[in-house]
Image: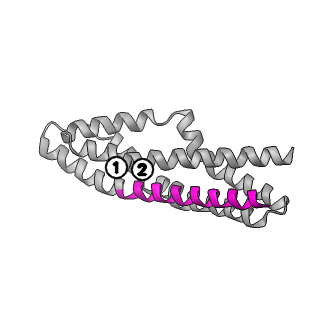
Amino acid sequence: MKFSFTAASATLSIIMAAGMAGTFFGFSTGVMPGLNGAKPASAIDTMQTINQRIQNPLFVGMFMLLPVFAAIAGVLLMTMNQKAAGLLFLAAAAVYVLGALFPSFAVNIPMNNDLDGVHIPKHAAEAAKIWQDYSGRWTAWNTVRAVSSWISLLAMAAATYLWGKN
């Protein structure tokens, strides 16, 4: 029973890390450059819609539960005398919390909330200023989230390799 719950926790955390890394990467390399190429008023409107729609149970669940499942896998591996693998899963959880969740709650989400409160200006220059102030900073911090998710995923992959060797 312990092995199957450990395997399930590890598998879920790996799937979630891959999903979050891909989501963050896709935004930084595709969505945001695409919006930057659109009219600023359209970019603001589209990002407001994205910010509202992304708050769904599947995304929020993956976003928030990834470090929980990674930590559970880490603790269970430690109880199975798989110390190195357990520590790597715990490190993966910590990296994700510090590199993805913390920037999300400290930077990206507050920026999204501020953008959601913007009434799209009729003047193109005003819209351009709002979008310019938002896009660069948001994308930079989103890229931090992507890289942190990749590091977390790599730590879990290394842990799984070590676990499989024993």
Could you tell me if the residues under marks 1 and 2 are in contact, i.e. CB atoms within 8 Å?
yes
- Residue range in magenta is 140-166
Where 98 falls versus 17 (above or below)? Answer: below
Q: Main secondary structure of the magenta part?
A: helix
Where 120 falls versus 27 (above or below)? Answer: above
Q: Give the residue number, with chain letter if any, for mark 1.
A: 29
The verdict on residue 159 being magenta is yes
Q: Quadrant of the N terminus?
A: top right
Could you say which disc has been placed on residue 25 in the image?
2
User: Residue 71: where, in percent of width, then height?
Assistant: 70, 55
User: Residue 29: where, in percent of width, then height?
Assistant: 34, 49
**Residue drawn at point x = 40 percent, y = 56 percent:** 143
Spatial CA distance of label 1 from label 2 is 6 Å
Q: Quadrant of the C terminus?
A: bottom right
User: Residue 22: where, in percent of width, then height?
Assistant: 47, 46
Could you say which disc has been placed on residue 19 in the image?
none
